[in-house]
Image: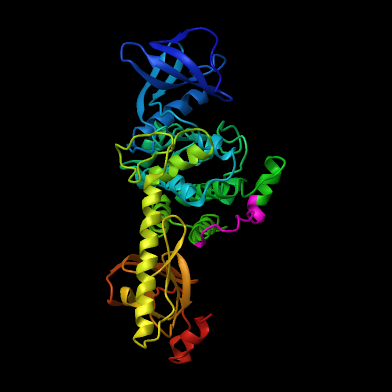
Amino acid sequence: MVRDEGPRTIGPYQIEETIATRAFTVTYRAAQAGLGRTVRLKTLKATVAASSPYAAELSREAMILARLSHEAVVRLIDLQREGGTVRLVTGDPRGPTLDEIVKSGSIAPDSAAAIALGIARGLGHAHERGVIHRGLRPGVVVVTRESGIVIVDFSSAEITADAVSGDLDAARARLPSAPDPLEGGESFARPDYMSPEQILGETAGAASDVWSLGAILHEMLSGARPFDGADRKAVAQRIRGGSPGSLPAGTPRALEQIVARCLSRSPDDRFEDARAVAAALESGLAARTTLSPRVLVSRALFAAKLGDEIASPGGGAGAPVVAARGPDLLGAARVFGLALALIVAGGAAIQLLRDGDTVPEPPRATAEDGGVIDVGSRDRGMIRVVAQPWAEVYLDGELVDVTPMGRPMLVLPGKHFVTFRHPKAPDEQRAIKIVAGQTVSLDVTMRVERMVDAGAGDAAPDAAESP
């Protein structure tokens, strides 16, 4: 951002700094006289007439923002026409853009998932109301000082027919048309985050935004765009016919699968909309960590040296934002607890040996600090699974086996997520809570899209569909 030379005013606004300059508009941070608040003021450049199509673009963005009300979507304040120009006034979330964070390098997987989750929630809210963003990229996402996520630009958004009540033609006549992504839309300098169908000039839907979100998540995890090139043409060609770059070793399998599904070539193979992406991200995070998304986002800010880390392990709405410093008493307590658990488990194993019992192989449980603890079999529960016709079974995001399984899964007490996956069926997921000594049975039927004809015999479907 560039600080302006000397004080300036535009209407009732005192300009503080320039946030962004594009082909036809300038966005300022400004103080609103008499109200003591700062706003974002997007206005036409002096060389652009208020009667031009680009002025209509500001009006269209305001009409779209008026449909939305979500913490992850910038808040519309006003649309003003005065002195031969048009001004869009919105809230002013303070913090770096995601683009600034990514430029410092790749982001830790759980922090990247937490940021993507915030984007997906705001985008899902828009999709629920028939708004397709069409221009999602790191530069339009602000990560606030309080570790919130806000999408701040909807200049290329469009409204779907299903979202317009009454006469669709009349409604669209009131709403100025959106710019063509590759011909004049100022938000599309490069097609780095555009879906294949957008590059081909086809109508963009919710699945197109899902592609863009997948590209952003890929970039956060790897530190590089999934489809890169020397110029617009090279990037567009790679998106249409190439494969995305690889993700770093150690990326959780669940995140890899989310990225791969978002970046599927066909829109039908992607998540239906951003709400479905949010659900998958929430499930994966719940399986891997007990930390809140805000704490994880704050760690990304801290790692990029663009903000402080939230010290509170709960990360609630009222948690203070402070830099992590001083002795880690919570970490010391966790280490002490793990050591005590190891001592207890070791004593139990010795007692079993003295009694002449055979000690089974202890399960390995990941502790919060990444360490591993052993827990005796008597402290576990069991999950028996059956899936028709067959499925890969994931326990808390990790592949365990393929059905039919010869023995039940031994698990620690607590909440677990079991996912059943078949290449020709939607995923089936179950959340269960296990207590020590309990056995839970899960029986699911996969909704396979294309099955072998019934006349081929009872065993034919399983034989044809098994791995």
Q: Main secondary structure of the magenta part?
A: loop
Q: Tell me the magenta residue range.
A: 239-253
Residue 160: horizontal and vertical position, in percent?
41, 45
Residue 368: horizontal and vertical position, in percent?
41, 56
Q: Is 292 displayed left or right of 303 in the figure?
A: left
Residue occupying image coordinates x 60% and y 55%: 247
Residue 383 in view here = no
In the rendered structure, does residue 251 fall within the stretch colored magenta? yes
Residue 342: horizontal and vertical position, in percent?
39, 66
Residue occupying image coordinates x 33% and y 15%: 36
Q: Is residue 103 above or below residue 20?
A: below
| 85 or 412: nearer the viewer | 412
The colour scheme used here is: rainbow
| 373 or 234: nearer the viewer | 373
* Total marks in image: 0
Residue occupying image coordinates x 43% and y 85%: 406
In the rendered structure, does residue 149 fall within the stretch colored magenta? no
Question: Residue 265, located in which quarter of the rendered image?
Answer: bottom right
Residue 52: horizontal and vertical position, in percent?
52, 21
Q: Is residue 422 above or below residue 235?
A: below
Residue 446 in view here = yes
Residue occupying image coordinates x 38% and y 56%: 336
| 258 or 164: nearer the viewer | 258
Question: Residue 93, located in which quarter of the rendered image?
Answer: top left
Residue most extreme to the bottom:
457
Q: Is residue 243 above or below residue 3?
A: below
Q: Is 61 displayed left or right of 37 in the figure?
A: right
Q: Which image quarter is the N terminus in?
A: top right
Q: Is residue 243 above or below residue 299?
A: below
